[in-house]
Image (cartoon, rainbow, N blue to C red):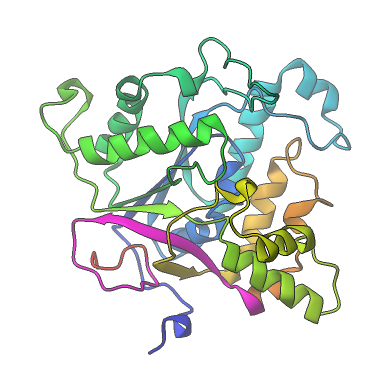
Amino acid sequence: MEIHDVKKLAPSQGLRLMAIHAHPDDESSKGAATMAAYVDAGAEVMVVSCTGGERGDILNAAVGELAHAHRDLPGVRRTEMAEAASVLGIKHRWLGYVDSGLPEGDPLPELPFGAFALQPVEIAAAGIIKLIREFRPHVITTYDENGGYPHPDHIHCHNVSAFAFEQAGNAQLYPELGEPWEVDKLYYDRAFSSDRLRTLHYAMLEGGYESPYTERVAKWENDEENEMFKWVSPHTTTTQVHCADYFTLRDQALLAHRTQIDPEGFFFAVPEHIYAESWPWEDYTLISSKVATQLPETDLFAGLR
């Protein structure tokens, strides 16, 4: 059987997946359909948000909550996150750190005092280790060394997630945080796969649509070594989870983050049928596995069933 013939997940009762993200809304733009598919298959899924997204921009001025968002953005982010979690059927926990913001300028300004990205890895990872020991996931997904894209919180999310994956089973470290638990597999999310963007771009053009990726694809194809693409994951895809049936839930979860996501914006520029026909998967790279598995995979729990 070809890898792309697999269109439905096996029953997943008793299996647990933890996805670690930097901000509320990241869980809905990266891997949301995968999580919804596993929940439907019977797995337990928990999202950990490292920060509250307090320094994010209000990107959708059309919402009726604009005054509320200016007055209490952290509160709005929490409400939005709860709605998105409900749509996806996932459990959710806040790590409790403060959004670092995305520094801009040349030279870049210093990060604000208390920002998540300034916290020592051993301290910031302690909360994740506690959650791992409580939830006992078999699989963790998070970002690569470049953060998926170069936001300081995304890069630090990678750092603390990788540390927590390695150390949650260490009985000598943080014994007060619960019984040690070894996570079997660690994956990096590949939401920014250049192969996916190219495929969707040409599928849009063939379908008679205007592609939102035209400028980016042209730059990639003319100058793949361009400095602006250095943040794109250096890893190759090892695992594709077929989850096209859950793209609608993914979009609903994204729309729950209404002050962050414009319903007429970039995330919704590709029609769902183009996604489903051309790239019905979400992509991951298997980085570490304590169980035997054969690549390529169609299942994050491969080797654990």
Please state the horizontal and vertical placement of residue 211, each as a whole percent of the image: 80, 66
Residue furthest top in the image: 113
Q: How many marks?
A: 0
Please state the horizontal and vertical placement of residue 34, each as a whole percent of the image: 50, 60
Q: Nearer the viewer, residue 226 or 208?
A: 226
Magenta-drawn stretch contains 279: yes
Residue visible at 78% across and 63% down in the picture: 214
Magenta-drawn stretch contains 47: no
Q: Is residue 219 above or below residue 305?
A: above
Residue visible at 37% across and 68% down in the picture: 299
Residue furthest left in the image: 172
Q: Nearer the viewer, residue 97 or 65?
A: 97
Q: Give the extent of the magenta segment.
A: 277-299
Left or right of residue 150, residue 187 in this image:
left
Q: Is residue 198 above or below residue 129?
A: below
Q: Is residue 160 above or below residue 221?
A: above
Left or right of residue 292, residue 204 in this image:
right
Q: Is residue 145 visible?
A: yes
Quarter in which the N terminus is drawn: bottom left
Please state the horizontal and vertical placement of residue 79, each as a whole percent of the image: 65, 31
Please state the horizontal and vertical placement of residue 131, each as a whole percent of the image: 32, 33
Q: Is residue 168 above or below residue 305?
A: above
Residue visible at 23% across and 67% down in the picture: 303
Left or right of residue 209, residue 222 in this image:
left
Q: Is residue 86 visible?
A: no
Q: Nearer the viewer, residue 190 or 244?
A: 190
